[in-house]
Amino acid sequence: MIAALKELRSDRRRIEQLAVKHMTDYFLRGTPRVVTAAEVQKEIDRNIARQSAPAAPQERYLDTMENMMAFVDERRRVQLPCRAKFRCR
């Protein structure tokens, strides 16, 4: 992730494309504003710093576990036998 962000940061053309993309998004939301290449680079630097933090790998792992626990794969769901006194479906 960090290597990809550093590569992105070094590509001036892609930085400018991102700035245009963000300006377009703001315009389409009805809140037009100018987004500069410097702002995009600053945000990339902020993300690099956040991903470089000592706790970042553990946070990514926990985020992944949360996402996977929220996802129900119906094909793999185990049908447990009904042991209730009322009617089971």
Image: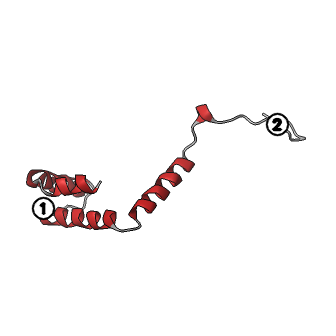
* Residue linked to disc 2: 82
Residue furthest out toward the top: 75
Q: Is residue 47 left or right of residue 58?
A: left
What amino acid type is highlighted by mark number 2? Answer: Cys
Query: Which label is found at residue 11?
Result: none
Residue 36 to residue 3: above or below? below
Q: Residue at x 35, y 68 (%)?
A: 53
Q: Residue at x 11, y 53 (%)?
A: 11
Q: Residues within 10 Å of mark 2 (few under 14, many from 20)?
A: few
* Residue linked to disc 1: 37
Q: Is residue 43 left or right of residue 53?
A: left
Local SS, label 1: helix
Q: Residue at x 16, y 58 (%)?
A: 9
Q: Is residue 23 visible?
A: no
Local SS, label 2: loop
What amino acid type is highlighted by mark number 1? Answer: Ala
Which comes sooner in the sequence, label 1 or label 2?
1
Of 27 and 58, which appears nearest the observer?
Answer: 58
Image coordinates for residue 19, horizontal then vertical, percent: 16, 57
Q: Is residue 46 visible?
A: yes
Q: Residues within 10 Å of mark 1 (few under 14, many from 20)?
A: some
**Quadrant in which the C terminus appears:** top right
Image coordinates for residue 88, horizontal then vertical, percent: 81, 35
Image coordinates for residue 80, horizontal then vertical, percent: 75, 36
Residue 5 to residue 80: above or below? below
Label 1 to label 2, Cα distance in Å?
60 Å
Image coordinates for residue 24, horizontal then vertical, percent: 19, 53
